[in-house]
Amino acid sequence: MEFPVASDPVGARENRFDWFCETVSTDVMPIALSTRHAADFRASITDLDLDAVRLSVVACSPVLSRRTSAHVRRGDPEHLQLALVTQGSLRISQRRNESVVAGGLVLTDTSRPSEGACIGGQIESVVLQIPRQAVALRPDHVDRLLAQNLAADTGSGRILADFLRTLLSHGPACRSEELRGMGSVALDLATAFLARQLGDAGQAPGEARARETLQRIHRFIENNLGDPGLTPRMIADRHNMSLRRLYTLFGDQPLTVAAHIRQSRLERAHTDLACGELSGQPVQAIAARWGFSSATGFSRGFREAYGITPTEHRALSLSALRPAKGTAPTGETSCSSLPTRRDAGAGRQ
């Protein structure tokens, strides 16, 4: 199996095989590993985060791996692992398929039981970790490729393999925004390669790819609401697309991209202002936490969305949290448990 974990000088550790087993099961996914080389076990693991996907190189002494249904239930990153075996041979079985791969590519699914074994000496593989939902191909079609020996020396397989090697060589010198762009390229190349193996035109369905990109942008927005610089232009630049392309992706959404940002920020501020634990913080401090740089603009937008001012909303919410006269205090409601309105800024703007 393939184990994309943080780089660590495994060979320098005592009980390094035990450490390796624990690290893989904790940081990647639960799995049972065994080896006849525990006393002199060696491994090197490097990791390159490309945002959309993750790229790793794993070299280790011979191991056997077994991931059961119980392991899947204990933890599943819901990833497809596309591995290029660059040294040694790997026997892999999954979904009633079994192959021996040396110099080729092999696809596995973390959501299914599997077994793997290094044949002979040390093995090295370059692993592309892909979120299952990011692959814009029918899942039942992709399942046919699991544990198959896929050629990496011709056509789209050769292009993908060469790209991954080049990315490993030069990626560490790239800026983070460049790596994000390269992650999108790697995802597109991998998807095109898998589509070709299925006999498709070598391209993912346009609608499915657009959905995946839109989901990625929504996650990006949610993670960056506190940045005052979060604008459509910034989002487009960070995702290596034009503004027109971004607006097109949001064309059938209830809100435009700018209105979606504004509504999400207002919802977060609305929840925080109702939180007793944050009652000592000024209204403007909460507004600033969610990316509002203008107190006037925040107050106006809040009133348009909720019909009252931020200060009035806070007073009403905190009053509701206080126990009635003659009753024992029940404790303040935590911020995360308060309901969030979903109608702020309703309609396209």
Image (cartoon, rainbow, N blue to C red):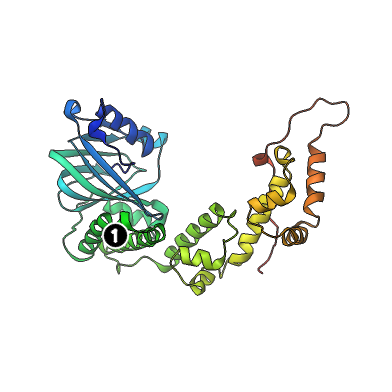
Q: Is residue 254 left or right of residue 93?
A: right
Classify mark 1: helix, strand or loop. Answer: helix
Along the viewing direction, whichever of 344 and 208 lies nearer the viewer: 344
The residue located at (32%, 56%) in the rendering is 173
Q: Residues within 10 Å of mark 1 (few under 14, many from 20)?
A: many
**Residue under pointer 1:** 194
Residue ranking furthest to the bottom = 244
Above or below for 228 versus 83: below
Indicate the quadrant where residue 334 lies: top right
- Residue 303 image point, x, y percent: 78, 59
Residue ranking furthest to the right = 325
Q: Quadrant of the N terminus?
A: top left
The residue located at (25%, 55%) in the rendering is 169
Along the viewing direction, whichever of 68 and 268 lies nearer the viewer: 268
Residue ranking furthest to the left = 120
Indicate the quadrant where residue 122 lies: top left
- Residue 264 image point, x, y percent: 63, 56
Q: Is residue 255 in view from this perspective?
A: no
Q: Is residue 201 in view from this perspective?
A: yes
The residue located at (82%, 31%) in the rendering is 323
Above or below for 83 versus 300: above
The residue located at (27%, 58%) in the rendering is 170
Q: Quadrant of the C terminus?
A: bottom right
Indicate the quadrant where residue 22 lies: top left
- Residue 135 image point, x, y percent: 38, 57
Q: Is residue 338 left or right of residue 10?
A: right
Question: Tag 1: residue type?
Answer: Leu
- Residue 64 image point, x, y percent: 21, 34
